[in-house]
Amino acid sequence: MEVEVEGGGDFANTSYTTICQDTFRDLGVRDSIDRVYLYVDPKAHVFIISVKIGRVTSPVKVDDVTRQETQERYRITNEKYAPKLLAVLGDKYGERAQQLSRLEINLELDEKEIEALKALIVYDPREDLVTRILDGMDRILPEGARVRCPISLPNRITIIASENSITEDWKKKAEEMVRMQEGVSEDV
């Protein structure tokens, strides 16, 4: 994970770099982040933090954590996902999904539903990752910077934070900074 901090003095930039690295390491998301960019302007009370998401493991599907034993009976092969699996099956199939024992499930499904069942997502690590990254960003941004404005870009989470209202000029400036980080010109 690469961290770049701009706008503060040498001491502030070094301190914020360490805070970013430690925070994302403590939250266990450091390996899934390619780059963190933080712009600090304490005089204007504006802070911009942008995180580029890198590698994320694939979503876990029902077929990944179960084995079909009979037409209607399934065995949970990875107990770690059992609570999420049972919740998904209960939401999707209601009374037709019954837990027979700790690792056995009975599902009354037809052939078409069985194929759809195999592809059903039990857990998407990307959703959890985004939640943890947002938590980290909240920890990094100063406590007084309560006014927040997200900027949406693919594979990137960006937030402008301030003590004051965030102006359109700051929004444009933040978008420019993030695009420069991505290596994308304004013409694109």
Image (cartoon, grey):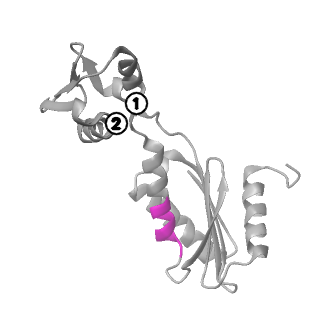
Q: Is residue 140 within the magenta segment? A: yes
- What amino acid is at disc 2? Lys
Distance, label 2 to label 1, CA atoms, is 9 Å
Q: Is residue 138 above or below residue 36?
A: below
Query: Along the horizontal axis of the image, is 103 left or right of 184?
Result: left
Residue 133 vertical placement versus 58 (above, below): below
Residue nearer the viewer, 173 or 61: 61
Q: Which x, y percent locates residue 163? A: 60, 84
Where disc 1 sits, the SS reads: loop
- Secondary structure that dominates the magenta span: helix
**Residue range (magenta):** 134-141
Residue 173, image x and y in percent?
77, 69
Indicate whether 9 appears above or below 93. Answer: below
- Whether residue 69 sits left or right of residue 115 in the image: it is left
Q: Which numbered disc, 2 or 1, marks the residue closer to the eye?
A: 2
**Closer to the N terminus: mark 2 or mark 1?**
2
Marker disc for residue 120? 1
Reading the image, the residue beneath label 2 is 92
Q: Amino acid at mark 1?
A: Leu
Specify whether residue 64 is painted magenta: no
Q: Residues within 10 Å of mark 2 (few under 14, many from 20)?
A: few
Q: Residues within 10 Å of mark 1 (few under 14, many from 20)?
A: some
The structure residue drawn at horizontal position 29% and vertical position 36%, both measured from the top left corner, is 85
Residue at the image point whose x is 42% and y is 49% from the top: 128
Asked if the residue under mark 1 is in contact with the one under mark 2, i.e. CB atoms within 8 Å, the reply is yes
Q: Position of residue 137 (x, y in %)?
A: 51, 65
